[in-house]
Image (cartoon, grey):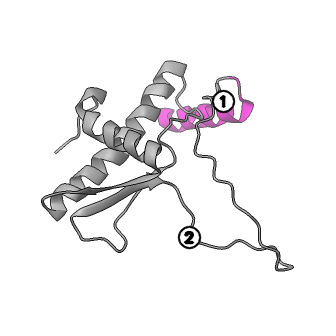
Amino acid sequence: MAMSKALGRYVDVKAVMDAALTHGSVLVTFDSRGSATAFSGRLYYYKSLLHEKQRAQLGNEVAATSTPYDGIMVSRKGLPETTLRIGKTFVNATVTTESGETVPLTLDASPSPAEDLSDDPLLIAALNFGKSLDAK
């Protein structure tokens, strides 16, 4: 079944992601594993719709877009199969230099402004190349 492209159909997803941004992460428990899986899919689809909307507003086929939700991820690790952890992106690792010095990680999940790439020569060349392939 195809998912709706109407952003208003995802108010529950938006509410959960807003809660995750406010609290760092939240646990959401569903009545079945299938419902949890469906919600996870809807969450990622909603995020992609937000980017699609920005690209359309910029009038570009390809653009650097961002939303407040870019740093949100879904995880089930260590949880019951009906529960999702929804929260800010995290790295469960230690980063060190080759000399053994620990490197602190700063993950900035805040959005950067969308960038208009319509005059980017590389993008223009890639789009023209794609159009030339379509013409063949």
Reply above or below: 60 against 29: above
Camera-nearest residue between 122 and 99: 99
Left or right of 19, for residue 41: left
Q: Secondary structure at mark 1?
A: helix
Camera-nearest residue between 33 and 134: 33
Q: Position of residue 18 (x, y in %)?
A: 40, 39
Give the residues in magenta: 119-136
Reply above or below: 30 against 118: below
Q: Alpha-carbon neighbours of circle 1 within 10 Å: few (<14), some, or many (≥20)?
A: few
Mark 1 or mark 2, earlier in chain: 2
Q: Position of residue 102 (x, y in %)?
A: 77, 72
Question: What residue is at 52 percent from the left and 29 percent from the top?
Answer: 61
Question: What residue is at 30 percent from the left and 53 percent from the top?
Answer: 40
Judged by depth in the image, the label closer to the viewer, 1 or 2, is 2
Is residue 86 in the magenta section?
Answer: no
Q: Alpha-carbon neighbours of circle 2 within 10 Å: few (<14), some, or many (≥20)?
A: few
Q: Position of residue 93 (x, y in %)?
A: 61, 72
Reply above or below: 130 against 72: above
- Tell me the kind of residue under disc 1: Ile
The quadrant in which residue 37 appears is bottom left
Q: Secondary structure at mark 2?
A: loop
Q: Residue furthest front?
A: 23
Left or right of 77, for residue 54: right
Q: Which residue is mark 2?
A: 92
Left or right of 68, for residue 30: left
- Tell me the kind of residue under disc 2: Asn
Most common SS among magenta residues: helix
Q: Which residue is mark 1?
A: 124
Left or right of 81, for residue 86: right
